[in-house]
Image: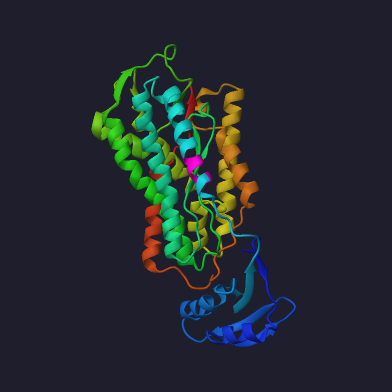
């Protein structure tokens, strides 16, 4: 919030009157626009009372625990409300359908238009569902969020899209909302990926592998979930053969790959939201550890390519360095947190956080792309 919210003075009698409906003001520091408060009811109830009133005039309470004291600041959101022109929304959607279909035709369907259409339906459904999950849960938690819109890229990129995004035009109220919004996209995308994977792998088969005639200059690394479904449906890979994945299976692979990327516990990725809500006091330490690990994996991948270290090439991927640096510059390995940073997560959500960890582990692959 510190990047998007502007502190308001606390000497306004009208603001103090609103605050007093939920909190007892014990002291005030006008220099830092900070009130030291005590909730009249539960933390959640007291906060929501003043949030409801302040938000009607574009203001928000920022409630934290600092140095064993409960503090409250009144903030206003900077910048303009971001809206998407409906025409632009439709144009981007149609453009992405086109680029994904062409990418599927070139890269995954072997020049078969019908198969490339199936690829597009699977991938667009997963990516759209991911962002729609975020948007619907955000709105349920009183966060003003746009509907998802897609980002097309030229089809010489293997998937023809950078996915979909939403904008949130109001702050996230509390840790529980932050957690729910953070998991909504990955869980929705993951669930939608499962039937796509099952159908796609059912339509796939094993074929003899000959790098000299292989149509793609690279292979896709497969995570635990992909391997498990393949084993259940097709059995073990015969010696000297490789899975010839149907384009629908490739769409499912992309879905769980996107799930894993978004669940990386860094910054304001979905996994970063989850870590910020579960570990409000130590989240930065987790972010830094993950950043260093990804950077090291990427650096090892580069060294493996430069020095042709086959054993290391099979364990690392240079792309992780790019991803780590990108997230670093986008988020500075920080997170603004919710408005109410005092009310803790309930036990049920803490249990769900373990489930999210499992989803990440079965979706993640250290080497998603391998050169032939």
Residue at 57% from the left image edge and 21% from the top image edge? 308
Tell me which residue sits at (49%, 52%) in the image.
270
Left or right of residue 134, residue 13 in this image? right
Image vertical order of residue 14 relative to residue 221, above or below: below
126 or 26: nearer the eye? Answer: 126
Q: What residue range appears in magenta? A: 88-93
Q: Position of residue 283 (x, y in %)?
A: 55, 59
In the rendered view, tell whether residue 15 sits above or below residue 364: below
Percent across and percent down for residue 368 are 47, 33
Q: Tell me: 339 left or right of 357.
A: right
Residue positioned 46% across, 81% down in the render: 42
Is residue 145 in sight in this rendering? Answer: yes
Residue 67, can we see it?
A: no
Is most of the magenta stretch helix, strand or loop? helix
- Quadrant of the rendered structure where residue 228 is? top left
Is residue 4 or residue 356 the one in the foreground? 4
As displayed, is residue 211 above or below residue 128?
above
In magenta segment, residue 91: yes
Query: On the rendered image, what quadrant is the N terminus found in?
Result: bottom right
Q: Where is residue 267 shown, x and y percent of the image?
A: 57, 53
Check residue 294 for magenta coloring. Answer: no
């Amino acid at each position: 919030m510190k990047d998007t919210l502007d502190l308001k003075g606390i000497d306004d009698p009208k603001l103090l009157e609103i605050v007093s409906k939920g909190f007892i003001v014990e002291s005030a520091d006008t220099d830092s626009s900070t009130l030291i408060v005590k909730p009249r009811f539960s933390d959640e109830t007291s906060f929501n009372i003043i949030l409801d009133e302040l938000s009607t005039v574009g203001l928000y309470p920022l409630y934290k625990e600092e140095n064993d004291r409960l503090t409250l600041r009144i903030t206003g959101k900077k910048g303009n409300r971001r809206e998407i022109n409906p025409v632009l929304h439709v144009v981007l959607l149609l453009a992405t359908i086109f680029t994904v279909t062409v990418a599927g035709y070139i890269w995954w369907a072997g020049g078969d238009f019908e198969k490339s259409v199936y690829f597009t339906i699977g991938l667009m459904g997963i990516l759209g569902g991911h962002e729609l999950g975020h948007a619907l849960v955000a709105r349920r938690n009183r966060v003003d969020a746009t509907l998802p819109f897609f980002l097309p890229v030229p089809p010489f990129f293997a998937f023809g899209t950078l996915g979909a995004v939403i904008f949130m035009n109001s702050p996230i109220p509390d840790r529980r909302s932050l957690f729910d919004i953070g998991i909504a996209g990955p869980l929705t995308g993951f669930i939608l990926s499962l039937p796509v994977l099952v159908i796609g792998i059912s339509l796939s088969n094993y074929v003899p592998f000959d790098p000299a005639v292989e149509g793609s200059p690279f292979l896709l690394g497969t995570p635990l979930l992909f391997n498990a479904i393949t084993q259940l449906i097709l059995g073990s890979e015969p010696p000297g053969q490789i899975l010839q994945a149907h384009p629908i299976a490739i769409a499912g692979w992309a879905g769980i790959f996107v799930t894993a990327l978004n669940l990386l516990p860094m910054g304001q990725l979905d996994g970063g939201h989850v870590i910020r809500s579960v570990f409000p006091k130590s989240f930065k330490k987790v972010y830094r550890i993950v950043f260093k690990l990804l950077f090291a994996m990427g650096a090892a991948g580069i060294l493996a390519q430069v020095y042709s270290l086959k054993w290391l090439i099979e364990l690392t991927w240079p792309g992780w360095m790019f991803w780590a640096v990108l997230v670093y510059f986008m988020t500075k390995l920080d997170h603004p947190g919710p408005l109410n940073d005092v009310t803790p997560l309930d036990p049920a959500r803490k249990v769900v956080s373990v489930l999210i960890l499992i989803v990440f582990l079965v979706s993640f692959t250290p080497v998603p792309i391998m050169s032939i």
